[in-house]
Image (tube, rainbow, N blue to C red):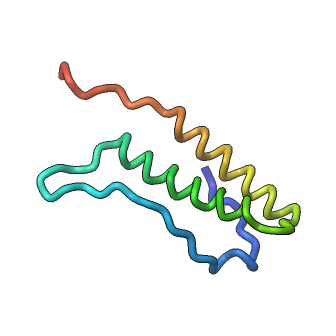
Amino acid sequence: MTAPFVPAALANQSITWIEKRPTPSRKLFRPARRDNATRALRACIAFLAKLDAPDQTTIRLRETLQQDANLFDSVFFPGMTGR
């Protein structure tokens, strides 16, 4: 994967999302880390969808982020039991 092109007009926008954090006694497992990444992507997608008159570059960025989020959502992590 490569980083998508972000138009200069959008480069410094602030995006907020909720991220799962590890507790002091536990680590954050792969599915939760993947979910954090997709939450960040979906927050960006939602921001881009709310723009009044997006240009073609912004629409392409939103579509690229949507494809990436869908790809990440499809990743399956098998259980670690039975080692």
- Taking the spot 54% from the left edge, 32% from the top edge, the residue there is 74
- Taking the spot 56% from the left edge, 70% from the top edge, the residue there is 15
Q: Which of the 4 quarters of the picture holds residue 19? A: bottom left
> In this rendering, would 54 be left or right of 45?
right
Q: Which of the 4 quarters of the picture holds residue 77? A: top left
> In this rendering, would 7 be left or right of 74?
right
Q: Residue furthest top?
A: 82
> In this rendering, would 56 be left or right of 58?
right
> In this rendering, would 33 be left or right of 48?
left
Q: Which of the 4 quarters of the picture holds residue 51? A: bottom right
Task: Residue 20 in the image: state x and y as whole percent.
Answer: 34, 55
- Count the numbered circles shown: 0
- Taking the spot 71% from the left edge, 51% from the top edge, the residue there is 64
Task: Residue 9 in the image: state x and y as whole percent.
Answer: 75, 79
Is 81 placed above or below 42 here? above
The quarter of the image holding the C terminus is top left
Task: Residue 38 in the image: state x and y as whole percent.
Answer: 52, 49
Q: Residue furthest left?
A: 25
Is 2 placed above or below 71 here? below
Is 73 placed above or below 43 here? above
